[in-house]
Amino acid sequence: MSSQPTKKLLILPGDGIGPEVMQEVRHIISWLEANRGLSFDISEDLVGGASLAQYGEPLRDEVVEKARAADAVLFGSVGDPRWNHVGFDKRPELAILKLRQELALFANLRPAKVFDALVDASTLKPDVVRGLDIMIVRETVGGIYFGNPRGIETLPDGSKRGINTEVYTTAEIERVARVAFDLARKRSNRVCSVEKCNVMESGLLWKEVVTDLHAREYRDVELSHMLADNCAMQLVRNPRQFDVLVTGNLFGDLLSDLASMLTGSLGMLPSATLGAVDNEGRCPALYEPIHGSAPDIAGQGIANPIAQILSFAMLLRYSLNMQAEAVLVEDAVSAVLAKGLRTADIMSDGKTRVSTSEMGAAIVNEL
Ligand code: ATP
Ligand code: MG
């Protein structure tokens, strides 16, 4: 048993299945407090459609301030079709976009890990994905989604042209590459940097900056470079060649969705988004499942809570430095899957179908 100072968590369950899967994390937190001598100072608040209904806006400033003050934020998901009629400036989804911006969360970490028990759920052959454990680090606040000039212009002949620009600065590339190198040191010590330096200036700078940083500070980490198109192919051909991949916003968006399907189910995939470490060594961080609010299955008690639970395990590992507890939670998930328990989304022949709360309880039991 360890005795650690109280950690401040902000829990934002959000909409749809968010509150249902978050409830299962709550049980795990209670178990950790009762059995591992941990103490969490937890506050919970409304975001997304739930906040719109109560306060008329998807994310209150008060919640942003609470997020800043917390050691980490555990986010559910936002999105509710009942708000589809409101303008873009009042959509539930704005809650997460604004929160990422306000906390300047620039590095999105998406692991793609294949659990032995679910090796058949992958879209690839079991032999190709067995044991797969990769981490994609995607830059999230720069690149072509935000660069200027941008817009749709009307030309003299009346036709139009749409413009987006990929802009990356040395500082933006360096800080995300640093996250990737630091992560690699805690994993298999390999980083593959992905860009298209053969056709893009920003890609050329990307490669140069990553190479320089590596030479200056991370010589112990094995660094390779790959063109983004080749990387997409390699992820499907032989994904286990990778450990940590680091790339820009656009390529990261595509490659991380591609990689997620190597593992089979949306209900299994966590993520983390990290900001810059401040002078006191604090780093803003938000953890959330890859999946959305899944309104089609909300309220039925059938959602898979594992993505949310594994997001909490990432929080333990990266924000609270509680490696042992993170491993404990991840191993409990593995064990429950090995015993054949399955929520509907990962159900297959001969396995035991369980509800959201039964899956959560089985994981707590395994701890
Ligand atoms: P969003 O815009 O919020 O990302 P989306 O429609 O893109 O929403 P999801 O909400 O993730 O995506 O839902 C996609 C599909 O996956 C739905 O059919 C949903 O029911 C299913 N799904 C998502 N998460 C889970 C989960 N945790 N357990 C079971 N099924 C899930
Ligand atoms: Mg989606």
Image: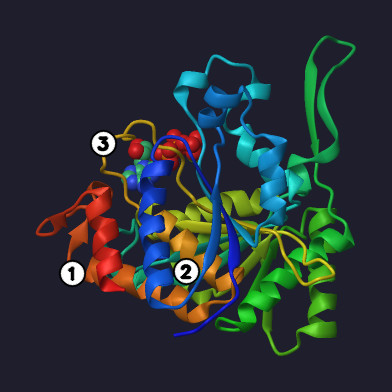
Residue ID at (55%, 83%): 188
Label 3 beta carbon less than 8 Å to ligand 1: no
Would you name the residue on which mark 1 appears? 339
48 is higher (above) or lower (below) than 141: above
Q: Which mark is residue 239?
A: 2
Q: CA separation, marks 1 and 2? A: 27 Å
Q: Quadrant of residue 261?
A: bottom left
Please report contact status of discs 3 and 1: CB closer than 8 Å, yes or no: no
Q: Tags 2 and 3 in contact by the CB under 8 Å rule? A: no
Residue 255: x percent and y percent? 56, 55
Dot 1: what SS?
loop
At mark 3, the secondary structure is loop
Task: Tell whether 52 sits left or right of 264.
Answer: right
Name the residue tied to disc 3. 300
Could you tell which of marks 3 and 1 lies nearer the N-terminus? 3
The structure residue drawn at horizontal position 47% and vertical position 81%, both measured from the top left corner, is 324
Q: For the residues marked 3 and 1, what is the alpha-carbon distance in whole angstroms? A: 24 Å
Q: Amino acid at mark 3?
A: Gln
Q: Viewer-nearest of labels 2 and 3?
A: 3
